[in-house]
Amino acid sequence: MSVACCVPVVECVYCLGCVRWVWKKFLYTAGRESENWGLAIASEFEPVPRFCRYIMAVYEDDIRNPISTPPGGYGIDPDWVIVKKSHEDTQGKVSPYLIYVDHQNTDIVVAIRGLNMAKDSDFLVLLDDKLGQAEFDGGYVHNGLLKAAEWVWEAESQLLRELVERYPDYTLTFAGHSLGAGVVTLLTMLTVKNREKLGLLDRKRIRCFAIAPTRCVSLNLAVRYADIINSVVLQDDFLPRTTVALEHAFKSLLCFPCLMCIMCLKDTFTMEEKMLKDPRRLYAPGRLYHIIVRKPFSSANIKPIVRTAIPVDGRFEHIVLSCNMTSDHGILRILTESQRTIDLMLERHQSTDSMNIPEQQRMDRRDSLAKEHMEEHKAALQRAVALDVPQAYSPSAYGTFRNIEEGPDFGKPGESSLTISQKRRESWDELAGRLFLDR
């Protein structure tokens, strides 16, 4: 009898807690998480709209005869599309992709499209993400996305080697959206770990643009690879903020209150310090670019800005409840807003006559930006070590796929990642030296 009397009280307390959580979520705005970040400049953000167009070109069955092109077209010369594979070609192992040699921008581009809601195989890849299932380079990654990236690597690594050797001055760029963003993130990491298979490709020639990515790498990897991996998030986009396992999230789509309940419990009872020290928790990868296009609690557009940083804590940890949380995830919406943003940036440059500056001064600016990014990367690594983020140390020089755990960076079977991390604790000077001398 006494237990039965307590049930209504517990229910009331729980309901009040959920109401308080929802109220705080409605008051939470997307701009808050990046308000202390620096502003991106035109030269570093300029490639984003172009890669969005390349990704959208993957949706076309025939590039030469497109059915639906975005404003401004795809910007692709069909004669230089080296490979284009469909779901049938990949047997559902990975989303469709293309390999394109962009002679105008001296780029070799691998572009992978996002989730196809009509393909069960895409959902199987996305939902294969049990916590702590896949280890890679001293951290944890999304298992399904890792397998998809391995498939692309096995299928195309020989072609990529031929292309980077044929065009030694070109950059090798991986670009993807949503599901494809997670695949290109892990494909970039595989490429870095196996550069000898591409003719000892210089790390500086590799880069990645993950557009609206899913959370796919542990915190130590997210920070460690921030010098080459860039994540682009449009204001309220839900996917980079979805901390609930994607399997549970998609199962709960038909029961929105169920999803909110799960998120409420996680946010209420999980301390930030515990989140940072959980080596299996996944995050949005690399350097983050946050596009702000609206005022809080408003649908009216403002002059867009882009903020960028390599945060260790505060990597899009909170869902923003707004009517734009799903529309901000669409690739066409991101293309539109990123193009509007870069047009405004270039307009500001022109108004100050900065477009007419001497070429030497342009090169000095680029060198200065690269130096600033390197210093910021060092500071992020230092903060990760200071916060005791598990295995926050530099990557090993070599490694391949699933046999990474057999290398010297891992302990004996049965040892937890935290135990290994404590054994491998090193000073900041050793960390910085090992990481940056490798370049």
Image (spheres, helix red, strand yellow):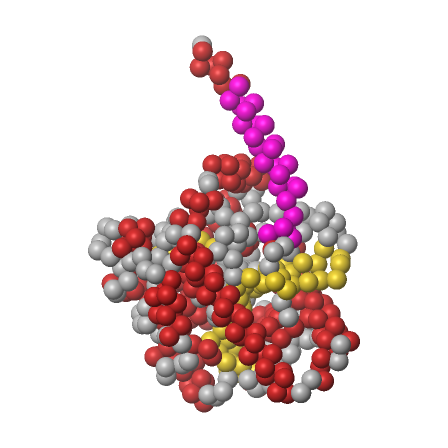
**Who's the residue at 72% across and 75% down the image?**
349
Q: Residue furthest left?
A: 412
Is 19 magenta? The answer is yes
Q: Does residue 357 sit above or below 14 in this rendering?
A: below
Seen from the viewer's position, the closer of residues 258 and 166 is 166
Which quadrant, please, contains the N terminus? Answer: top left
Q: Residue at x 60, y 72 (%)?
A: 44
Residue 347 on image: x %, y %: 75, 74
Inspect this view and state whether residue 284 appears: yes
What's the magenta region? 9-33
Q: Say if residue 138 shows up in the picture.
A: no
Which image quadrant for residue 329? bottom right
Is 29 above or below relative to 44?
Answer: above
Query: In the picture provided, is 367 more to the left or to the right than 270?
Result: right
- Please say if 19 is above or below 219: above
Residue 249 lies within the magenta run: no
Vertical placement of residue 98 versus 258, above or below? below
- Is 159 on the left-hand or right-hand side of 209? left
Report whether 72 appears left or right of 3. right
Q: Position of residue 420 (x, y in %)?
A: 28, 54
Please indicate whether residue 283 sits to the left or right of residue 16 in the image. Answer: left
- Tell me what residue is drawn at x 56 percent, y 23 percent: 12
Residue placed most toward the observer, 362 or 419: 362
Residue ID at (44%, 84%): 164
The outermost residue toward the bottom is 166
Q: Position of residue 418 (x, y in %)?
A: 32, 50
Q: Nearer the viewer, residue 362 or 249?
A: 362
Where is residue 59 shown, x and y percent of the image?
59, 69
Name the image quarter holding the C terminus. bottom left
